[in-house]
Image: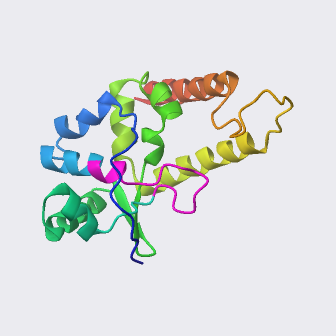
């Protein structure tokens, strides 16, 4: 499936400093890390869209805007798929661990020990799928909450409540403690 969208240079993505561990542990080289961040920046960040976490631009569009050849874009994309950071499904490329670029998650994950953060970037596709299912369920729960006040934005509440974020962080902390005790 070929998607035709113009390259997006507007907006921002939160990035964990721990992403540099991919360099330190030789999971990615410097060029691959740069390519990874550029691909992530081109994904659809809106959970309400059917193309959520899909890289919306084709190799030719990206090559034109990134000032390189389409074969370079293709090679970098294939390298990242091989490393498990991107996945090809139904003819489109998706960001595997997309939650790691969402502000709510970055705030929580930034507090984790480096050993745990490294595993989040490099864990298997099955583990990522399990986590994404949990995340999706949490977002469904959040979306189902009815708003009682008319003083709220017409866009609704898109984030987690402070209580939910604290509970999530506590769960992550407990998981980390249980993991540390096994070693």
User: Can you see residue 108?
Assistant: yes
Q: Main secondary structure of the magenta part?
A: loop
Nearest the viewer among 157 and 171 is 157
Q: Is residue 27 visible?
A: no
In the shown orientation, is residue 36 left or right of residue 156?
left
Instruction: Choose top left, top right, bottom left or bottom right for residue 101.
Output: top left
Location of residue 59 in the rendering, given as x and y in whole percent from the top left corner = 26, 68
The total of numbered circles placed on residues is 0
**Location of residue 118 in the rendering, given as x and y in whole percent from the top left corner:** 33, 36
Position of 22 compared to 164: left or right? left
What is the image's colouring? rainbow
Q: Position of residue 119 (x, y in %)?
A: 36, 39
Most foreground residue, 88 or 56? 56
Name the residue located 41 percent from the left edge and 71 percent from the top edge. 3
The residue lying toward the viewer, choosing from 76 and 48, is 48
Whether residue 52 is in magenta: the answer is yes
Q: Residue at x 25, y 34 (%)?
A: 21
The quadrant the C terminus occupies is top left
Q: Is 115 in the magenta?
A: no
> In the rendered image of this protein, does residue 157 appear above or below residue 41?
above
**In the rendering, at what x and y percent does residue 67 appear?**
14, 58
- Residue 109 relative to residue 23: left or right: right
The front one of 56 and 164 is 56
Considering every residue shown, the one lying at the far right of the view is 148
The region drawn magenta spans 38-53
- In this view, 127 is above or below 156: below
Which residue shows up at 39% across the image and 31% down it? 116
């Amino acid at each position: 499936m070929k998607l035709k969208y113009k390259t997006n240079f507007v907006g921002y993505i939160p990035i964990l400093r721990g992403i540099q561990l991919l360099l330190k542990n030789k999971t990615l080289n410097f060029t691959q890390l740069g390519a990874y961040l550029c691909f992530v920046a081109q994904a659809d960040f809106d959970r309400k869209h059917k193309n959520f976490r899909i890289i919306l631009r084709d190799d030719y569009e990206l090559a034109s805007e990134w000032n390189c050849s389409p074969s370079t874009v293709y090679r970098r994309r294939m390298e990242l798929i091989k490393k498990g950071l991107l996945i090809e499904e139904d003819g489109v490329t998706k960001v595997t661990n997309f939650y790691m670029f969402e502000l709510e998650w970055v705030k929580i994950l930034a507090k984790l020990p480096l050993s745990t953060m490294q595993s989040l970037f490099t864990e298997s596709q099955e583990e990522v799928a399990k986590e994404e299912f949990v995340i999706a369920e949490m977002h469904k729960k959040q979306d189902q909450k009815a708003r009682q006040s008319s003083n709220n934005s017409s866009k609704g509440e898109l984030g987690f409540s402070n209580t939910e974020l604290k509970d999530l962080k506590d769960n992550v902390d407990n998981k980390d403690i249980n993991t540390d005790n096994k070693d």
